[in-house]
Image (spheres, rainbow, N blue to C red):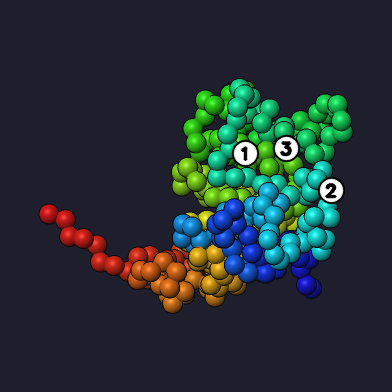
């Protein structure tokens, strides 16, 4: 059975005033699938995510959400369907962790309507999933970078989206929470059919958790497919301009990517 295409971008050209970034990039993600967008700094990963999220309008090309053009979808409906988490999430006021997570319920509330017990239960479940229950009453400014990242991932989950767009979701996180975050989103893909699009620098995490990958360089697609199709020595040498080793993790069977250069001898 063919999977439903959740989001599709075709021939996207986009950038910033006087700075072209993306040059004809096409990609799609199916419901229940995790797509990793990888590539070096400046490749256009975050810009593509912003185009998918509607915060940057493409100069050319189209983006569709479940078969509908993005610009035809009313903002509240879009916010119920798509959740975005950026690399940086500034908070101007002293909101608590629970208050931040409850903000994810805003697209589901009518004008002047307060959160119901149902909304509180959803926020509480999101806190639980991201190991934040003990921090619920803390002000977000008091948290570490990794804790703040988990708060905004929990807020995205509280939106109950069908598509999650995550820009470096594991930045600032330790190994335990990196594994936990990916495990939680893999569960959401399986349980809810959520489509997840994540930009990542960690090629090994992408290989381990993603169903498909898009490799970008200089704003163009170099490879798109399964991790085995994308993470080849030839592709990585071309994009990262360095020698690499690509093998298999003996424990998981997943691809692993390592620098191939010999270590510098230490005195």
The image shows residue 107 at horizontal and vertical percentages of: 80, 39
In the displayed structure, 157 sits above or below 211; it is above
Residue at x-position 55% and y-position 35%: 148
Q: Earlier in the sequence, mark 1 or mark 3?
A: 3
- Which label sits in the foreground, 2 or 3? 2
Where is the C terminus found, in terms of image quarters? bottom left
The image shows residue 61 at horizontal and vertical percentages of: 71, 66
Extreme residue in the left direction: 267
Q: Which mark is residue 143?
A: none
1 or 148, nearer to the observer: 148
239 or 31, nearer to the observer: 239
Q: Which mark is residue 152?
A: 1
Q: Which residue is mark 3?
A: 104
Q: Earlier in the sequence, mark 2 or mark 3?
A: 2
Extreme residue in the front direction: 18
Q: CA distance from mark 2 to mark 1?
A: 23 Å
Picture quadrant where residue 151 is located: top right
The image shows residue 91 at horizontal and vertical percentages of: 60, 30
Determine crowd level at label 2: few under 14, some 14-19, many 20+ residues with C-alpha closer than 10 A. Answer: few
Determine crowd level at label 3: few under 14, some 14-19, many 20+ residues with C-alpha closer than 10 A. Answer: many
As drawn, is 147 to the left or to the right of 245?
A: right
Q: Which residue is mark 2?
A: 74
Secondary structure under tag 3 reads helix
Picture quadrant where residue 212 is located: bottom right
Q: Earlier in the sequence, mark 2 or mark 1?
A: 2
The image shows residue 44 at horizontal and vertical percentages of: 55, 59
As drawn, is 44 to the left or to the right of 238?
A: right
């Amino acid at each position: 059975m063919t999977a439903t295409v959740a989001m599709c971008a075709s021939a996207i050209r986009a950038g910033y005033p006087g700075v072209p970034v993306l040059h004809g990039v096409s990609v799609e993600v199916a419901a229940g699938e995790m797509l990793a967008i990888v590539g070096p700094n400046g490749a256009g990963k975050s810009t593509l995510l912003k185009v998918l999220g509607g915060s940057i309008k493409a100069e050319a090309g189209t983006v569709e959400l479940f078969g509908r053009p993005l610009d035809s979808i009313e903002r509240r409906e879009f916010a119920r369907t798509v959740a975005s988490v950026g690399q940086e999430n500034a908070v101007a006021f002293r909101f608590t962790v629970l208050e931040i997570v409850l903000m994810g319920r805003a697209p589901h509330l009518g004008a002047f309507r307060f959160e119901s017990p149902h909304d509180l239960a959803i926020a509480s479940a999101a806190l639980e999933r991201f190991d934040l229950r003990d921090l619920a009453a803390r002000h977000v400014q008091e948290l570490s970078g990794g804790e703040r990242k988990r708060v905004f991932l929990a807020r995205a989950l509280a939106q109950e989206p069908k598509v999650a767009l995550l820009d470096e979701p594991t930045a600032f996180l330790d190994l335990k929470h990196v594994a936990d975050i990916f495990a939680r989103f893999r569960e959401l893909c399986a349980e809810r059919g959520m489509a997840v699009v994540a930009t990542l620098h960690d090629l090994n995490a992408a290989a381990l958790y993603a169903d498909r990958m898009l490799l970008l360089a200089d704003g163009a697609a170099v490879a798109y497919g399964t991790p085995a199709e994308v993470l080849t020595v030839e592709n990585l040498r071309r994009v990262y301009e360095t020698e690499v080793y690509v093998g298999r993790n003996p424990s998981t069977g997943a691809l692993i990517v390592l620098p191939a250069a010999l270590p510098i001898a230490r005195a």
